């Protein structure tokens, strides 16, 4: 019955060549069961792990089992081993709107003014707004001259930017500004780059800027397979992923 | 996705079943009512670009007799918004429709409508939370790094909007001759969490809606006014999961944000009769799709004041 309805039960498969390192896989639905078949390990060689299986909502994310070849002589003798480490980790993302903010931890009195902030990926020439500085609060936070203003940024590192005037592009000389004390926030302004950023031409293969359109990220269903699953370099894998139409809990049948 | 069957939604026939379903709790959707509505035409694109010119430099220029001033380049901001499809579906089994006493399908349609409005309000709420410049309440006395609301901090938020030449959202409400009422200033809107009502009421300038000179312009979710701010409260307003929780109080001026749909198919309630996708006409689907996106049009005209709750 359930298969009459699109989306109720789903299955999909992937193939890949392992790099031996842990890898995060993204699925097109929330899987209930995922089976990693190591086709290269599908031999009678003792110690190989041809099948690793993960079930959703296990007690721990790493809890999964593997089939292990234990007897090469018999060629068909397998055992089950529990993946207690380097196994599977659920890596789903919540979706929603990506944040455009970070906090300030330092601001120099220099030309140009350099801001140290919590880790955030800015692009050079983006416009930011600085807030929550100044002296109209019980403990002055300093840098009154920057407060509530917009600036064009030059990215120096993942935690530092220098400031320019958003219109003229002149570096901000904060030598004579009030010394920074604490606090402050940086907000990426309306997701635009500098005023009059380069236009995309019809003949251009590359976009000269990332427009950062307002967009709501969907929930993603991801599973990180650890090194205990990924085998050795160049192992060939076939992944089976299933979402069941219905899982009925039958309870204790005793 | 799970079919609604009598296993989970069964008959009430072992009791005398009241045919009318009880009222559901309905959160107040207060975010989208403050934005500007835009619509993309069909058969085009899913992205809309808004453009805003930067003000020209207005420093006085005295013209010499023998030459023209240097031309100034017109500068602009481009803001990109991409619409996306949101939606939800419910499947009703035939047995539910045949044996359950209440008007399940009608109530489910109403439930879906409420769900859609709430979902789209949450999208805009999340845009506020992620993209609006914020300042912290610092003048309170509850001992947290971000304190409870104080009139001084509310005034800082108002000052942010004023310094950016933000236009008010509402006109003045005139005073009247009724005892205990007074006029309300032309104001910005504020979206606040219902949990902060005692803190808002404690603000120096608070005037409850009952004391407005006129009730005609009062919104259903409106709690009161403080000088140049009129406060809307809802459970949908963002609150952090931190300990103590931090509440977003977003001050909105005119032209601050907008939302985009696609023509007349922006939102669609889709009800398919029994047999929509099965051989024996045993299942009915009901759902909605909504093409929607929200974006901040001008950061200068919107600011979030972060606060915690006052000490009990």
Image: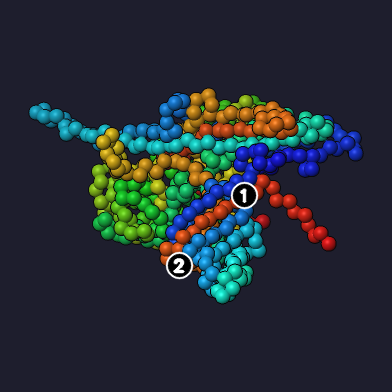
Q: Is residue B22 above or below residue B311?
A: above
Q: Which residue is mark 1?
A: A243
Residue A177: x and y, percent?
31, 56
Q: Which residue is mark 2?
A: A232
Residue B3: x and y, percent?
71, 40
Residue located at (70% from left, 31% from top):
B279
On-image quarter of the N terminus of chain A: top right
Q: Is residue A50 above or below residue B194?
A: below
Residue A18: x and y, percent?
44, 61
What secondary structure is marked by label 2? loop
Separation of marks 1 and 2 at Cα, in angstroms: 28 Å
CB under 8 Å between discs 1 and 2: no
Of A215 and A77, which appears nearest the observer?
A: A77
Pointer 1 local density, CA inside 10 Å: few below 14, some 14–19, many at least 20? some
Is residue B152 visible in the rendered image? The answer is no
On-image quarter of the C terminus of chain A: bottom right
- Of callouts 1 and 2, which one flags the residue occurring earlier in the amino acid sequence? 2
Residue located at (58% from left, 33% from top):
B289
Q: Is residue B210 above or below residue A66?
A: above
Q: Which mark is nearer the camera, 1 or 2?
A: 2
Residue located at (66% from left, 38% from top):
A4
Is residue A233 visible in the rendered image? The answer is yes
Residue B41: x and y, percent?
45, 25
Left or right of B140? Residue B115 is right
Any mark on residue A138, and which? Answer: none
The furthest residue to the left: B66
Of B178 and A4, which appears nearest the observer?
A: A4
Pointer 2 local density, CA inside 10 Å: few below 14, some 14–19, many at least 20? some
Residue located at (84% from left, 37% from top):
B11
């Amino acid at each position: 019955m359930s298969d009459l309805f699109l989306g109720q039960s789903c299955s999909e498969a992937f193939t890949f060549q392992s790099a031996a390192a842990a890898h995060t896989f993204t699925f097109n639905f929330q899987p209930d069961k995922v089976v990693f078949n190591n086709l290269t390990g599908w031999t009678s060689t003792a110690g190989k792990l041809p099948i690793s299986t993960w079930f959703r909502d296990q007690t721990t994310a790493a809890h999964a089992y593997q089939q292990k070849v234990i007897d090469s002589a018999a060629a068909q003798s397998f055992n089950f081993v529990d993946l207690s480490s380097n196994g599977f980790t659920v890596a789903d993302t919540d979706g929603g709107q990506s944040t455009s903010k970070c906090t300030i931890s330092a601001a120099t009195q220099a030309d140009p003014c350099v801001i140290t902030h919590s880790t955030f990926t800015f692009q050079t020439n983006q416009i930011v707004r600085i807030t929550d500085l100044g002296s109209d609060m019980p403990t002055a936070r300093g840098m009154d001259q920057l407060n509530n203003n917009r600036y064009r940024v030059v990215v120096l590192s993942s935690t530092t930017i220098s400031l320019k005037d958003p219109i003229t592009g002149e570096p901000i000389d904060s030598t004579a500004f009030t010394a920074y004390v604490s606090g402050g926030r940086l907000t990426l302004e309306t997701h635009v780059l500098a005023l009059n950023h380069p236009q995309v031409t019809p003949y251009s293969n590359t976009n000269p800027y990332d427009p950062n359109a307002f967009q709501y990220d969907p929930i993603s269903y991801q599973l990180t397979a650890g090194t205990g699953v990924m085998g050795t370099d160049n192992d060939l894998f076939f992944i089976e992923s299933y979402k069941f139409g219905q899982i009925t809990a039958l309870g204790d049948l005793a | 996705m799970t079919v609604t069957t009598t296993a989970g939604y069964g008959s009430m026939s072992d009791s005398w079943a009241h045919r009318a379903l009880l009222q559901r709790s309905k959160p107040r959707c207060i975010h989208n009512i403050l934005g500007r509505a835009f619509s993309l035409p069909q058969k085009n694109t899913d992205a809309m670009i808004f453009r805003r010119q930067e003000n020209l430099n207005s420093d006085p220029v005295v013209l010499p007799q023998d030459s023209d001033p240097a031309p100034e380049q017109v500068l602009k901001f481009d803001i990109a918004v991409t619409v996306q499809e949101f939606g939800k579906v419910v499947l009703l089994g035939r047995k539910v429709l045949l044996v359950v006493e209440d008007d399940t399908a009608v109530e489910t349609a109403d439930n879906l409508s409420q769900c859609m409005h709430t979902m789209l309000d949450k999208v805009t709420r999340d845009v506020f939370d992620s993209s609006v410049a914020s300042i912290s309440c610092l003048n309170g006395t509850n001992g947290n790094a971000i304190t409870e609301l104080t009139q001084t901090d509310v005034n800082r938020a108002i000052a942010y909007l004023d310094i950016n030449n933000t236009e008010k959202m509402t006109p003045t409400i005139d005073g009247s001759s009724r005892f205990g009422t007074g006029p309300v200033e032309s104001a910005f809107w504020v979206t606040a969490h219902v949990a902060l009502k005692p803190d808002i009421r404690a603000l120096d300038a608070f005037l409850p809606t009952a004391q407005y000179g006129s009730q005609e312009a009062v919104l259903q979710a409106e709690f009161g006014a403080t000088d140049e701010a009129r406060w809307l409260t809802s459970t949908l307003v963002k609150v952090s999961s931190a300990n103590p929780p931090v509440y977003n109080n977003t001050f909105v001026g005119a032209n601050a944000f907008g939302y985009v749909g696609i023509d007349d198919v922006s939102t669609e309630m889709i009800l398919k009769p029994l047999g929509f996708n099965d051989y024996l006409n045993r299942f009915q689907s009901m759902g909605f799709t909504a093409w929607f996106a929200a974006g901040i049009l001008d950061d200068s005209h919107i600011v979030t004041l972060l606060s915690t709750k006052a000490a009990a």
